[in-house]
Image: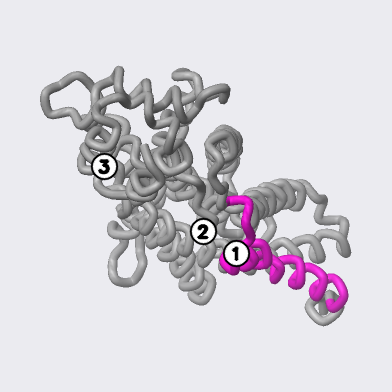
Amino acid sequence: MNAQDCIALSTRTKFTTYMDSLRNVTGGDFSLVKDCRAQVCGALWGTGNPDISGIGMVIGYLLESVICAVLVACSLWVDKTPTKHRTAAPVARLLLSNTARTFYDNAFFFTFAIQVASIVTLTRVDFGINADGMGGITMQIAWLVSSLTLLPLLPLILRPRMFFGRRSSDTWSGDSAAEARQGQRFLFLVICWAMGFCPFFSRMGGTFGQSRIGNESDAAVSTVEWNTIGSSCFDGIKTLHPDEEKLITVFGIISYLLLSIVVISKIILSAAEDENNRQPAWLREYSRAFDDSSKFGTRVWLVICAMISAALIVQFWALFRFRRLQSSMSEAAGGNFSDAEWTFGQIVAVVVFIPVLSEIVFLWKRRSLYLV
């Protein structure tokens, strides 16, 4: 194949159309892909997308999850702080509540932006439904980052008193301003959750939908031909084991389903309230049982936090694994791994949580203004 053919193959099109073009250029001999390895492999598996998987974006994902974990740990510590510590307890609650509020607001806008970026990325590959293999790694990374940004919002929304600096024996219900603000936070979560359905739908379609790769009559490329292309692109590179792919898929699906169960349950419970926000008797009993100030409610919250932690660990491992795989493939093919480049969006992702640190420093230095 000549240089002009390679340039033509570097342009992404619909999967079936692209495979027809590749078949025409190679004359059906897909082993010739090695002559245009950088262009073909980049088109099929992607060369990175700095807007969702650049190094700056990864730092942003890590910061969101780490800050969430620190807030959860601090909340548990504050609850166990004896009330006799008249100085430490109020200061701790002040720092926790204000930090949680600042973090949640920043995390929402960060998550919202990532959901938009994921949707835009997936639209380029028909949401993965009939474009199996087209930008495959980039598509899977888009699925991952959608969940990675959504999950850290859940522990905070399920523990409202974290935002209001109350002791575990206190309740924030009945405080109109607090309830209104909490309702707004939940609305933010619902918006991001609804947007996250697009990547989830894409994942389900790409995983369980009809593949365009196989030996069926309507397949775009046969299994043997696809394996030949894959061998050329990933020669000498350790790819994902099928069991690893299954693990990533399972945790990705469970993550969104867990989020969906919580969000839909809260929506149904909110709909059961009357116009004066009064709850039916059965709903009041349910609310008391699962209230985050009760022992049972705290246990349920801790179980959910544990599930979220496990899901985040697996998906962060998958994200780094996919980035390393994509980087190795691009370097071996002589292409350019764009995720290694810094862009404006990545810088924003790194600094988006700086207001959290700024809030902590300010409150600590000016705590006497609040503790009167």
Mark 3 residue type: Tyr
C-alpha gap between disc 1 and disc 2: 8 Å
Q: Quadrant of residue 201?
A: top left
- At horizontal 62% and vertical 56% (from top left) the residue drawn is 341
> Is 121 above or below relative to 352?
above
Count of residue discs: 3
Mark 2 residue type: Asp
Secondary structure beneath disc 3? helix
C-alpha gap between disc 3 and disc 1: 29 Å
Judge whether residue 111 is colored magenta. Answer: no
353 sits to left or right of 88: left
Q: Nearer the viewer, residue 149 or 369?
A: 149
Q: From the image, state whether disc 2 or disc 3 is nearer to you.
A: 3
201 sits to left or right of 313: left
In this view, which residue lies farthest toward the front?
A: 2
- At horizontal 46% and vertical 63% (from top left) the residue drawn is 112
Mark 1 lies on residue: 343
281 sits to left or right of 52: left
Residues under numbered marks 2 and 3 in contact, where contact means CB atoms less than 8 Å apart: no
Point out residue 64 in the picture as x, y percentages from the top left corner: 62, 54
Mark 2 lies on residue: 51
> In this picture, which residue range is highlighted in magenta?
339-366
Secondary structure beneath disc 2? helix
In the rendered image, is residue 349 in sight?
yes
Q: Residues within 10 Å of mark 1 (few under 14, many from 20)?
A: some
Mark 3 lies on residue: 18
Residues under numbered marks 1 and 2 in contact, where contact means CB atoms less than 8 Å apart: yes
